[in-house]
Image (cartoon, helix red, strand yellow):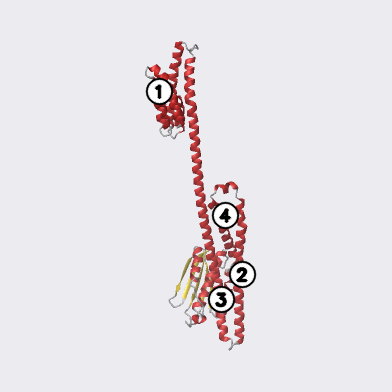
């Protein structure tokens, strides 16, 4: 608005000599100058119109400020370059012609006594001086403004991407923690259910023979003690895995302090807080899983497992097919737990039933099957008082499917129950 006011006053002052030369009233020249100069107020909205008006009043030697400011605004605006070049060329040509004519007239009247060379020189330098600087400055300012807007957009986009990464990292950490909780729950179920089931069976046998056969009662009591100690040992191992995961989390947490200050400044507050914590959660869960896999159990302990069930009164038949070889820790652990949980279910639901355990080492997979015959006394399971939460089969299925295998379970035609699993060996 200030520039428009100055331009209007300038054009009004220049309208006085224009009116005298044109032979019109001075007041008309002043009003014309005021109207023409005030067009500069539209320079941001319609820069092309301002430049065209400035070019139109150039022959009247009016609107020098309006022409300079109009060209600057035109060059800095978001307009095609051909339009800017065309209007700048028109302004340059118009200023050059007017200056050439005015200087030649002054020399003809004797106001200037220089040579003929001065006429084109004055026309060229004046036109360039009034056109080139505002156009170049406008192009520079426009380019800088567009660059800053592009950088701002990139910064906003980077902030959104970092926020999205932080959310995804937090989701991965939560998923890893959930997976670890599920794995620990499966391990606890397998260890506690199997050992405690055997302890309950032996305790029931101990109660039955305590008075009739003291030697057998002592033997059963010793077996109960051994089962309890084994259960405590496995529980301690699992607690050690959990503590090692917590220690890994404490060791990983200070790593966030080594992040450069520039990176922390560029990341949103929520993202900078979520990324390290999420990374710690994933690292801790991975460390705990690796430690658990290294602890076992292994397939080489399968005969001991079956021997414990046989000591509890179960008739177990073990058959192994194919060449025995070692597998990855996760595969051996899953195969062992499937057999262990299947035997636990036999103790719970079919006490005294004859059970067949088959293990097959094949070319690219390992297969296992645990099948029990109908129990001789259907009420024996209820008398043993063994509860069932229904999580055993779910845990076995999750273990096998997690390794890309196949799990099938269900009753047999003969009245028993069969659990089958096939796990890829690679």
How far apart marks 1 and 3 lie (CA) works out to: 109 Å
| Nearer mark to the viewer, of 4 and 2 | 4
Disc 1 + disc 3, Cβ < 8 Å: no
Residue position for label 2 = 236
For marks 1 and 2, give the one nearer the viewer.
1
x, y (%) of residue 255?
61, 54
Residue 143 in the image, given as x and y percentages of width and height: 49, 35
The spot of residue 418 in percent (x, y) is 47, 73
Label 1: element kind: helix
| Residue on which disc 3 sits | 196
Give residue 42's position: percent from left, percent from top: 41, 32
Q: Residue furthest bottom?
A: 212
Q: Is residue 272 above or below residue 299?
A: above
Label 4 sits on residue: 276
For image coordinates 48% across by 34% down, the residue present is 142
Query: CA gap, disc 4 to disc 1?
Result: 72 Å
Q: Is residue 207 left or right of residue 48?
A: right
Q: Are marks 1 and 2 in contact (CB under 8 Å)?
A: no
Q: Quick one: SS at disc 2? A: helix
Q: Quadrant of the N terminus?
A: top left
- Indicate which disc, 4 or 2, sits on the residue closer to the N terminus: 2
Measured in 3D between alpha carbons, the distance from the residue under mark 3 to the one under mark 4, in whole angstroms, is: 41 Å
Question: Does the residue at mark 3 contact the one at mark 2 (Cβ under 8 Å)?
Answer: no
Q: Kindly identify which numbered label has been placed on residue 30.
A: 1
Mark 2 neighbour class, 10 Å CA radius: few under 14, some 14 to 19, many 20 or more: few
């Amino acid at each position: 608005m200030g520039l428009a006011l100055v331009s209007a006053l300038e054009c009004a002052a220049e309208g006085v000599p224009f009116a005298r030369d044109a032979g019109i009233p001075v007041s008309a020249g002043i009003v014309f100058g005021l109207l023409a100069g005030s067009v500069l107020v539209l320079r941001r909205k319609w820069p092309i119109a301002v430049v065209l008006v400035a070019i139109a009043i150039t022959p009247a030697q009016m609107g020098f400020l309006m022409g300079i400011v109009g060209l600057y605004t035109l060059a800095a605006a978001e307009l095609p370059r051909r339009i800017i070049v065309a209007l700048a060329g028109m302004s340059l040509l118009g200023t050059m012609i007017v200056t050439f004519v005015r200087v030649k007239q002054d020399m003809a009247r004797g106001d200037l006594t220089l040579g003929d060379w001065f006429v084109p020189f004055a026309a060229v330098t004046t036109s360039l001086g009034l056109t080139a600087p505002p156009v170049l400055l406008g192009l520079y300012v426009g380019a800088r403004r567009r660059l800053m807007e592009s950088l701002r957009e990139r910064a906003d986009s980077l902030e959104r991407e970092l926020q999205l990464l932080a959310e995804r990292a937090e989701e991965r950490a939560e998923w890893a923690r959930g997976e670890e909780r599920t794995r620990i729950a499966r391990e606890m179920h397998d260890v506690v259910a199997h050992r405690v089931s055997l302890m309950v069976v032996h305790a029931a046998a101990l109660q039955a023979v305590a008075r009739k056969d003291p030697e057998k009662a002592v033997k059963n009591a010793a077996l109960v003690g051994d089962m309890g100690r084994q259960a405590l040992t496995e529980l301690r191992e699992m607690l050690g895995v959990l503590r090692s995961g917590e220690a890994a989390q404490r060791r990983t947490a200070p790593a966030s302090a080594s992040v450069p200050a520039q990176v922390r400044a560029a990341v949103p507050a929520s993202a900078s807080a979520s990324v390290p914590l999420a990374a710690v959660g994933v690292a801790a869960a991975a460390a705990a899983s690796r430690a658990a896999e290294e602890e076992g159990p292994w397939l080489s302990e399968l005969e001991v497992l079956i021997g414990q069930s046989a000591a509890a009164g179960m008739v177990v038949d073990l058959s192994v097919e194919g060449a025995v070889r070692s597998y990855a820790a996760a595969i051996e652990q899953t195969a062992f737990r499937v057999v262990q949980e299947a035997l636990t279910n036999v103790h719970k639901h079919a006490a005294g039933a004859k059970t067949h355990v088959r293990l097959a080492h094949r070319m690219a997979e390992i297969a296992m099957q645990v099948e029990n015959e109908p129990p001789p006394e259907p009420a024996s399971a209820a008398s043993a008082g063994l509860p069932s939460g229904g999580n055993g089969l779910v845990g076995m299925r999750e273990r096998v499917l997690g390794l890309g295998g196949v799990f099938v379970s269900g009753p047999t035609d003969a009245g028993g129950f069969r659990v089958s699993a096939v796990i890829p060996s690679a």
